[in-house]
Image: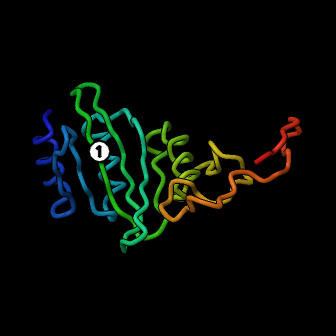
Amino acid sequence: MTFADLVAKLGEKFPSKINSYEKFGSRFIVVDRSVAKDLLKSMKYDFGFTYLVDIVATHWPKRKEKFDVVYNLFSINDKLRVFVKYSIENEKTFTVTDIWQGANFLEREQYDLVGVVFEGHPDLRRILLPEFFEGHPLRKEYPLKGRKWFNNADEQGLGLKFTR
């Protein structure tokens, strides 16, 4: 299956809810949030995108829809990579752990770094940063100066010394 075939079939299934384009050698499908989960299920079960490579969230504080969520999907049979993207107004969206089990860690990473809350996730907690870390460092509003990476306590008793 080619990208054009995929877009045509998805266009029939989700009329006026998707837009597609190719840029820098990558293929993108932009989908309306209202049908995004149904489209993602269809991508796996109907079109064979069994490999969820990555999930990336980006923060755009000046827009009405402040976050984009992008799924990097790969069809092993067709050797086709597609990025599925949708926008959300606040930091809450749905989980896809019920579609791809591998989404568990990927969603936790985006929760930790960008602050996107994946509702329905079985274990949504920080994965890269310690629990006491304040904020989400990949948000554009995260301060570049005067930020506190860690507190001055040796939380785990490792004998760490904090100096400037």
Quadrant in the picture for residue 83: top left
Is 34 left, or right, of 12 in this rendering?
right
Residue 37 appears in the figure: yes
Q: Residue at x 33, y 54 (%)?
A: 38
Residue 119 appears in the figure: no
Q: Residue at x 40, y 64 (%)?
A: 60
* Local SS, label 1: strand
Residue farthest to the bottom, as pictured:
64
Is 77 left, or right, of 158 in this rendering?
left
Closer to the camera, 122 or 91? 91
Q: Residue at x 33, y 63 (%)?
A: 33
Q: Quadrant of the N terminus?
A: top left
Figure check: 143 above or below 81: below
Q: Residue at x 21, y 28 (%)?
A: 78
Categorize mark 1 by other alpha carbons within 10 Å: few (<14), some (14-19), many (20+): many
Instruction: Point out residue 147 in the picture as x, y percentages from the top left corner.
Output: 65, 59
Closer to the camera, 147 or 18? 147
The residue that label 1 is drawn on is 83
Amino acid at the residue labelled 1: Phe
